[in-house]
Image (cartoon, helix red, strand yellow):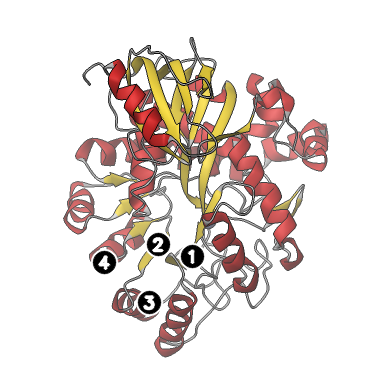
Amino acid sequence: MPKLRPTLLVLALAAAGSTPAATVIRGATVIDGTGAAPLTDVTMVIDGDHISLMGPGLRAKMPADTKVVDYTGKTIIPGLVSDHAHVGSVDGTKSGTPVLYNRANILRQLKQWRTYGVTTVTSLGFNLPAVFYPLRAELHAGKADGADLFGADRGIGVPNGAPPAKMMTVGSDQLDRPETPAQARAAVDAAAQRGTDLIKIWIDDFNGSLPVKMKPAIWHAVIDEAHAKHVRVAAHVYYLDDARQLVDAGVDILAHGVRDRPVDAAFIEAMKKHGTWYVATLDLNEAAFIYARHPAWMDRPFFTRAVQPDLAKQFADAAWRDRVQQDGSTRTNEDALRTNMANLKALYDAGVAIGFGTDAGATPLRIPGVAEHRELALMVDAGLTPVQAIQVATQRAAALLNLTDRGVLANGKRADFIVLDGDPSKNIEATTTIRAVWQRGQQVAGPLESTGP
Ligand SMILES: [Zn+2]
């Protein structure tokens, strides 16, 4: 990138001439989300909610009313974009009850995500339309406080099957379970009519614990009808064989990684040929066992400030920790995580389209904000470089949602970004050293030490 000339900055500030006066951010290292190497000593001019000019190394005389923020020594990355989360399903240790899907609880969660630098969140199912759509509109317009929200309407599940009614006790207004292809098409039509961003389906038997999986006739009908209505379909998957069939049938997004066995060349080719997106959700399996082991990061503000009191009590309970450690599912989750990480690396290296998500908010252990930063660390453990992992969580994740206004820091893009004390290009865990979060050109959160759940 060529160095900016001072005259350009003066022109940008003059053009910004709106109220409030332009803001100039300077001195920081910027990882812009495109996968490019970090830029040092960057100057960023913010005009309203977007970046009007950005480039390295620039000092100029500025109008007296210009707000200048010096972030020398800090590193800035774009706000994170989650392609797979859930809102209104969890509060403390409570989950899966319809009363949690209310505006106050959802805004509490969206604020927590934003405090952790996740400025855009996609709620992949269980959305109560009467609450979801008005809130989505307010958030899009900047009239409610929290991460911006997208979603997949109610979602389409299976009678007596996934998602498990025991784990996800949701209201009948929050999930469809069609019995026939005609009912499935009607459910898609209704969601499309309401203006959904995506359609969600579940193809899984949850490690054999459910008697049935969604019949191919149903998911074929869903994909066909959704595409006829110009809406894309995201599928919950676990097994390679299901993923393969769905990809061949034109599903648009695999909303979880393949976790039963290694992906093969034919599957990788099919993903590339169809342009199918892959969202690994590595953190989901780690979250099932890691808190019982109490890694050192659980004592840092990065973690403690995200944990509601009831959940903190559970983590401190020795009996709970013993139970999780001895639970047979821990081994299954460790294996699933290992397989998922190897598959992510294979697909990434082959050039498959990779999105970003964690399934945060689906259960109490999948903690908004914490989950996304753990996902970044696990992606690097899987073999991506920190800059690649950040690109997936920003530019690529926004591209999955067809959002062109965010995900990278550049002229004309939304001024959604995280200011970090550390440089994550050297150590990915530096994404947790949050000094400030900016959204739409305004600082909306400070250091994690100063916040609480
Ligand atoms: Zn989910």
Residue under circle 4?
A: 250
Residue picked out by circle 1:
152
Precedes in sequence: disc 4 or disc 1: 1
Is 391 situated left or right of 150 in this image? left
State which quadrant residue 253 falls in.
Answer: bottom left
Q: Nearer the viewer, residue 253 or 232?
A: 232
Chain-order first, disc 1 or disc 2? 1
**N-terminal label among 3 and 1:** 1
Determine whether the beta carbon of the residue marked 2 sits less than 8 angstroms from the nearest atom of ligand 1.
Answer: no
**Relative to 139, is 424 on the left or the right?**
left
Judge depth for marks 4 and 1 and give the one in front. Answer: 1
Question: Residue 216, relative to residue 200: is it above or below?
Answer: below
Q: Amino acid at mark 3?
A: Val
How far apart are the two marked residues, 4 and 1, measured between alpha carbons?
18 Å
Q: Which residue is mark 2?
A: 234
Q: Is residue 234 above or below residue 118?
A: below
Instruction: Find residue 330 and report its horizontal and vertical position in percent.
Output: 60, 40
* Distance between the alpha carbons at the discs numbered 3 and 2: 11 Å
How packed is label 4: few (under 14 Cα within 10 Å), some, or many (20 or more)? some
Which of marks 4 and 3 precedes in the sequence?
Answer: 3
Query: Residue 222, which numbered label?
Result: 3
Left or right? Give the position of 293 relative to 198. right
Amino acid type shown at disc 4 = Gly
- Nearer the viewer's eye, disc 3 or disc 1? 1
- The amino acid pointed to by label 1 is Ala
The answer to whether the residue labelled 1 contacts the one labelled 2, judged by CB atoms less than 8 Å apart, is: yes
- Give the CA separation, mark 3 to mark 1: 13 Å
